[in-house]
Amino acid sequence: MIELINVNKYYKDKHVLKDINLDVKRGEILALLGLSGAGKTTLLKVMNLLEDIDSGKIIFDGIDVTNLNENEKVKYRRRMCLVFQKPEFFRGSVFDNIAYGLKVRKVSKREIELRVKEALEIVGLKGYEKRNVKTLSAGEAQRVNLARALVIEPEVLLLDEPTSNLDPKNTEIIENIIKTAREEKGVTIVIATHDQGQALRISDRIAIINDGKLEQVGYKEDILFNPRTLFVAKFLGMKNIFKGYAKNGKIFFEDLEITVNSNINGEVFFGIRPEDIMIVREGRKKENMLRVKIERINLISASIYEIESYYKSTKIYIHVPRHVVDVMKLYKGKYINISLKKDSIRIFPK
Amino acid sequence: MNNIEIFLDSIRRAIELILSGDPYVLSVTIVQLKVNLTAVMISILLAIPLSIILSFKEFKGKRLVLSILSTLMSLPPVVVGLIVFLILSKSGPLGFLNLLFTPEAMIIAQTILATPIITSMSVASIKSVSDSLKYVALTLGANKYQMILSILNEAKYGILVAILAGYGRVAAEVGAILIVGGNIVTYEGISYTRTLTTAITVEASMGRLDAAIAFGLILMLISFIINLTLFILQRRSV
């Protein structure tokens, strides 16, 4: 639906988008995941033709829209809509604000009234037409912000951190509206977020952006379990990253020899997700086993304990289901055997 | 009569003068309003498009233009009067137009006084509309023209305040119109280029306190109305 080819963008001397290649497919929800300042907003503005690019190409629905004049841009811009992170309204009522996109498209008054009403129902703010936008709460404001985009019935909805200022309940409401828009209207959605949980909850694919560069784009399982860069691995919760020396399918690390599925040789980083580490019962043997000392046990969600353990001076995080702590009688100071399964180890050449 | 009695008597006669519809007082008031309003109207026609260009177009030297405008805002009226006088005088570049000592000359001088203030303040109030609202308008499908109208609509109270500030400046001004208008009254005692402000200077210096006070009262009434409107607008724009 929107394809970016080798897109580069500078703000004065700052290189904010670096060789971006991204193909947003029709009808998908793509999460643009990255930290603040990574270039998410700029990328969305570029897709919306609100910002010119310095080099590269933008293809919208098969048509090159890179170098259009202002009038032609409006034509394509009207098939999409960008919802900004901070709701900014025009002076006046909720109705005026939601009707705005329809008014500039010269939609008839009667149809505007119907569609605004419908949009307010979709976002759960039925009857809010006459409210002054200044009196809205943060959650309501964000929903009106979304409603004035939905009312246009865009083919592509670009969302910039739509829930970053909201509590969990309002976040859930907004996420449901987004999912419904895709399911019922087939809207193509690109959502920028810094929250990996949100990206996993609502998207089909995730594009990880870091410092203006796309680190990895793929289905979420792929991104999560086959991170291609150290940044992606760390960003998506691979808390155990170590430095070692790889040779002939083995990594030498501390005084250990760890077997891996890789033929890379030389200095490498390698990592394993905390939930992929297995605790091995005393007396049993497993691959890549090592003995660690438990330093701290911390409940990090309703069902998961995080165990901070040490092998010599190396800190290793292990996530275990709640019952494991009781069943295996884990406590601070205890020594346990753990196994780093070679299928779970990911290697990042230096 | 002691001094206070003389003063109070002057005020009483001044009010009588206003209420009686004295043709001299009336004509001075009309000249005042005509010159001020026309000058402000022309200023609006110049300042609004100028402030739109300055707000929405990027060009080289834009900063320079803005800083010149804010310098012009504080230009002393007497100096403006002098410059217009020199330009319109017989030997000046526009002397052939024979405009010196006419209401038109006064309008020119006051337009020069009001335009920078209306432009600068309008630019400031357009600027105060959040920049991201421009993007909001565009992403919601507005073309450039529609976007500019929407932003102007957001800034409308600020622009009205700018216009009133411009009016305030020219309404209270004496120096420029005194020089280029000449403070002329016809043989019939009807004002040609005499305004409330210039009239006060003449009447006061001639010791006609009642007339001077009458003009002062009318002038105060006008500025009171302006300020009241400003106050209401500013409260609404918040």
Image (spheres, coloured by chain):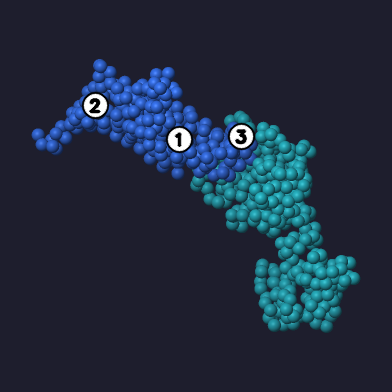
* Shade of chain B as shown in the rendered figure: blue
- Residue drawn at (64%, 40%) of the image: B139
Q: Amino acid at mark 1?
A: Pro
Q: In what element is the residue under mark 1?
A: helix
Residue A103 appears in the rendering: no
Residue indicated by mark 3: B144
Residue indicated by mark 1: B116
Residue A345 appears in the rendering: yes
- Residue drawn at (65%, 48%) of the image: A11
Question: Do the residues at pointers 1 and 2 share their chain?
Answer: yes
Which chain did the image draw in cyan? A
Sequence-first disc among 1 and 3? 1
- Apparent side of residue B34 relative to residue A202 in the rendered image (left or right): left
Sequence-first disc among 1 and 2? 2
Residue B18 circle label: 2
Check the image and name the residue furthest to the top: B188
Give the number of the mark in front: 1 or 2: 1
* Nearer to the camera, B29 or A238: B29
- Residue drawn at (74%, 66%) of the image: A238
Q: Amino acid at mark 3?
A: Lys
Q: Quadrant of residue B80?
A: top left
Q: Chain of mark 2?
A: B
- Apparent side of residue B135 relative to residue A264 in the rendered image (left or right): left
| Mark 3 neighbour class, 10 Å CA radius: few under 14, some 14 to 19, many 20 or more | some
Residue B104 position, x and y percent, is 39, 22
